[in-house]
Each structure stands twice: as structure tokens, then as C-alpha cells.
Image (cartoon, grey):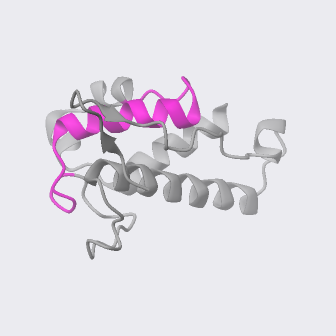
Amino acid sequence: MAMTETDTGAIDTAAIGTGPIDTGAINAGTVDTGAVDTVTTSVFDAVVELIGTLVGDDLEVLGVQVRHDTPFHEGLGLESIDLVTLAGLLTRRFGPRVNLAEHLAELDLDEVIGLTVGEIADYVALRVREG
């Protein structure tokens, strides 16, 4: 799924899924290890999908395999402005409890530069579980 630019240069994110991740037992407070792994995997997949929208193409088409340890900046060639865009997309997908910008403000510069896709997904999964 790709983001498209409108005639004004703005990014059209209407095609991005906005449905919440089904956390089932997690929000009910009866979490088991299997449920956590399912949520973490679902969140990781959603984060990778949203990153795919940032590059404007399917990551597989570009030959990029995104893993938990893939660096956001070095591995994907994305910049800090892309983190800002991703933060908005994550809030749109998962709701206001996922505030990546606030989370990034708590990190030092080296941590932000070295941020991996998995660390972003882990943050989102934690916030989803805290729901």
C-alpha cells in the first residue's frame, strides 16, 4: 500500500488502515504469553506496513527485508522528518495512546539515530497493551 501525493504536495494517507489492532484478552487484563506474542507480531507487521507507505512503495518490491533489528535511519535511509510522519501514522492507526513523538523526546540523540524498527514496534506494542 503506497501513500500518494496530492496536487498540493500533501501526503494522502486515506488508504492507510485505521482500524485498531485486535488485542482481545490483552485489554481485558488476561494476558498470556501467546497473546503478547501475537500482538507484538501484529504491531510489528503494522509498523512495517506504515514504513512502506513512507517509502512510497512496497518494501518487498524495493528488495528491502525489514527485520526487528533494521535501523530506521541507516537500514532504510529514512530521515528524522520520516519519524515525524511515522509518528502521525502510528497515532492514526493505534490511537492517541501511541505518541511516538513524546517517546522520542525522552531519548538522547544517539538513541534516536540508532533507533530500530523493532524498538519502534516494541514501544507501540507496549502502549497497545497498556491500552
Q: Position of residue 4 (x, y in %)?
A: 32, 44
Q: Position of residue 55 (x, y in %)?
A: 26, 54
Q: Is residue 31 toward the left or the right of residue 40 in the image?
A: right
Q: Residue at x 42, y 37 (%)?
A: 13
Q: Residue at x 22, y 27 (%)?
A: 8
| Residue 35 sits above or below residue 61 on the image | above
Q: Position of residue 57 (x, y in %)?
A: 31, 60
| Residue 23 sits above or below residue 118 on the image | above
Q: Nearer the viewer, residue 75 or 64?
A: 64
Q: How many marks?
A: 0
Q: Nearer the viewer, residue 111 or 56?
A: 56
Q: Residue at x 40, y 56 (%)?
A: 118
Quadrant that contains the N terminus: bottom left
Q: Residue at x 50, y 56 (%)?
A: 44
Question: Does residue 125 belong to the magenta stretch?
Answer: no
Q: Quadrant of residue 102?
A: top left
Quadrant that contains the C terminus: top right
| Residue 117 sits above or below residue 125 on the image | below
Q: Position of residue 34 (x, y in %)?
A: 74, 63
Q: Quadrant of residue 105?
A: top left
Q: Nearer the viewer, residue 109 or 78?
A: 78
Outermost bottom residue: 63
Q: Is residue 113 toward the left or the right of residue 10 in the image?
A: left
Q: Is residue 70 toward the left or the right of residue 22 in the image?
A: left
Q: Report the magenta residues as a range.
A: 73-100
Q: Is residue 125 toward the left or the right of residue 21 in the image?
A: left
Question: Does residue 76 belong to the magenta stretch?
Answer: yes
